[in-house]
Amino acid sequence: MKNITKIALASVMALTLSACSSTKEPLVYDNFQANKTDSFAKTTMRLAGSNKFVDSSDGIEATRQVAGASAMQLGQLLMLDFAGAATSAINESALENEPLAKQAQFIVKVKNVSLSDLKNANQIVERASKKIDQLASENQLMIADEKSTSIQRQITYKSNTYCENANVASISCAQYLGHGYIGSYDKLKSEAYVVFETRNTIISLFMMNGYRGDDVYLFHPRKISGGTFSSSYGYYAGSPIVIHQGKVYHFITNEKAGEGSDLDDLRYIFYRKNDDKKQLFDFNSKDMSFSELPLDAKL
């Protein structure tokens, strides 16, 4: 059953990944500046090429939210998703038509890029892609197999320690990366920001945990889910977030760089359903380990 789960999750991720082409036109700034009251998270998504993200006092308005979620137990909330009945309880937000808000996104800053270099966008995207491979290597994730399709790279990793931890929750040690595109370019700083949609955020979060460089960001929506009625899965971060230099940032008005919480303290839930079996897991991004939770666990 575990192998079936892995295959099912991999298939859904591969089939549903909607990567953008590197030919997408970037936003070009003469001298990018953060808006005075914008959060670090919102500013990051502007660099990713979107001006649609919004801040609020509690950080929940940047993506969908479930009505009454604060009063619900986590198990009840997830059972709605498992049953496919959550639609009626979901409020549409201002970001309903923003593709970046739907899935997790790596955002990589590439330095020393001239305006003329933008004509060779694929070369810039390739530099950013190598940075993500570097992150994997620094976290002892070696590439065991790699396949490319018209929309994505499918990367399978091997590790003496961490991939075995993922097996506890029947998570494949693999990542699915869209081919990437340049979201924005800053003329004054000669910096381009490259965006890659990423699936299997277990791997993405693990890679970001120990990285303290200033050139890689990870956006994660409140919840990512998929599958069928009989077999489904999801990742739950509680609210939309941006991860950078080991910190978690929310879309909270005036939350600036350095004011985020530690990534180690993020409550991150993985849930799945196979036939009639439902399971919840707490995920620790420091070592890619899982702890199973009761279905009535509190948020």
Image: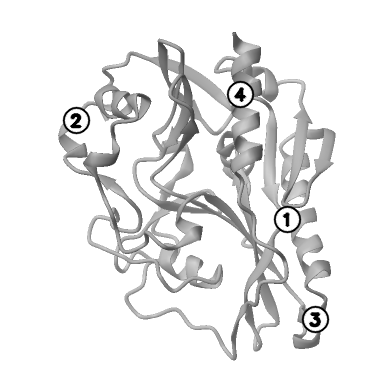
Q: Residue at x 39, y 51 (%)?
A: 240
In this rendered view, identify the residue nearer to me: 285 or 71.
71
Task: Please tell me which of labels 3 and 1 falls first in the chain.
Answer: 3
Q: Residue at x 19, y 30 (%)?
A: 72
Q: Which residue is mark 1?
A: 179
- Quadrant into which the N terminus falls: top right
**Amino acid residing under circle 1:** His
Residue that extends furthest to the bottom in the rendered view of this protein? 30
Task: Please tell me which of labels 2 and 4 falls first in the chain.
Answer: 4
Task: Please tell me which of labels 4 and 1 falls first in the chain.
Answer: 4
Contact between labelled residues 2 and 1, with CB atoms less than 8 Å apart? no
- Tell us which disc is closer to us: 4 or 1: 4
State how far apart marks 4 and 1 are (Cα): 22 Å
Q: Residue at x 41, y 62 (%)?
A: 97
The answer to whether 245 is drawn above or below residue 120 in the figure is above
Q: Which residue is mark 3?
A: 119
- Tell us which disc is closer to us: 1 or 2: 1
State how far apart marks 2 and 3 are (Cα): 51 Å
**Coordinates of residue 138 in the picture (x, y in percent):** 75, 41
Q: Which mark is residue 8?
A: 4
**Coordinates of residue 228 in the picture (x, y in percent):** 48, 27
Q: Residue at x 68, y 74 (%)?
A: 192
State how far apart marks 2 and 4 are (Cα): 29 Å
**Amino acid residing under circle 2:** Met
